[in-house]
Image (spheres, coloured by chain):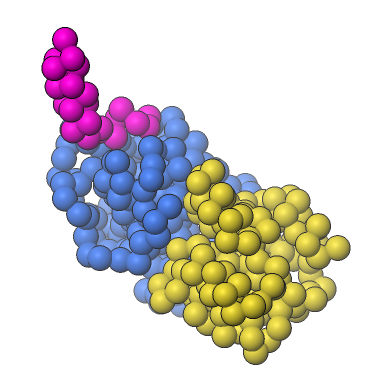
Amino acid sequence: VKILVTDDSRVMRQIVIRTLRQAGYDEHDIIQAEDGREAFQMVGSEQPDLVLSDWNMPEMTGIECLEALRAAGSQVPFGFVTSEGSPEMREKAANAGALFLIAKPFTEETFRDALDGVLA
Amino acid sequence: VSTLDTGERRRNGEHRPVITELIDEPTIQSIAEDAWTALVGEDEILVPLPGELPADVLSSWVDVVGPWTGTVVLTTGRETAAGLTRALLGEHAPVELDEEDVADAFGEIANVVGGNVKAALPGPSTLGLPETGPTPPATRPDDLCRVDAQWRGQFLTITVQGTTGVPHAERNEVPQ
């Protein structure tokens, strides 16, 4: 299983990857993108099984990336990991085709709850 | 009567709330404590105690634009910001931190605190990207909420401060 972690913060990518390992997903192949544009390209070139993406990023935001992927016909499973977890953001994410939204700060349990159904 | 009512509604519509009407210190403290535990470390505690900032400080902040417009600012000593960065990076911390590491890590704490403060405010709002640098001035003392805290005995402040007009430069903001 290949997971694409997308965040403009290198520190946050490391924390997400560390939390993935702590949550028990340490056998998976984890790749990284710095913004939505790079993530969009890497979905094409790397064929990940899941995209975990920040929302607010320069160049292309997470939601723009998701919308571009769906418009291009990609159905790659996509979830947000973002500092904004309001009901409006969750609704917008779900309407665009996201499977879940993990709000920062998160715990390994939050990751397990969101990812277990997707990666089972 | 209807004329009076219309006038009242109009005045209410023009009222821009100050931050103390929307959020209080314990809420901000609680948001910050959660961010500390999750980002800095499970055993890392933010103690609600006042103190004194050193001369050499660094701030990180995010802007919120919406029914309430302003900035969520973290300020601490430069050394403490570096210590926070090492804690966030954990085993990946380099021997010598560069400014980019500190801007990234300290900015991400402001991003998480700011995102959760934004979620507690009336929407729709947009959140800017995190920035670091000299402390942004608080231009409206009547529109400010401040929390003083200590981490590992080092002092830091979190202010949620209103701004007049559009804050700072145009950034990549995401409509909610």
A67 and B125: which one is in front? A67
Give percent across and percent down for residue A47.
71, 83
Q: Is residue B86 left or right of residue B64?
A: right
Q: Is residue A9 magenta?
A: no
Q: Quadrant of the N terminus of chain B?
A: top left
B140 and B173: which one is in front? B173
**Boundaries of the magenta span:** B1-24
Instruction: Give the residue displayed 69% in from the left and 73% down from the top.
Output: A76
Q: Is residue B104 left or right of residue B67?
A: right
B171 and B160: which one is in front? B171
Q: Is residue B41 visible?
A: no
Instruction: Give the residue displayed 57% in from the left and 85% down from the top.
Output: A41
Give the vertical position of B40 relative to B51 (above or below): below
Give the vertical position of B157 relative to B105 (above or below): above
Instruction: Give the residue displayed 31% in from the left and 37% down from the top.
Output: B146
Place residue B87 in its image quadrant: bottom right
Instruction: Give the residue displayed 33% in from the left and 50% down from the top.
Output: B64
Give percent across and percent down for residue B96.
46, 77
- Magenta residues: mostly which secondary structure? helix
Give the drawing colour for chain B: blue
The chain shown in yellow is which? A
Give percent across and percent down for residue A83.
50, 54
Q: Is residue A88 visible?
A: yes
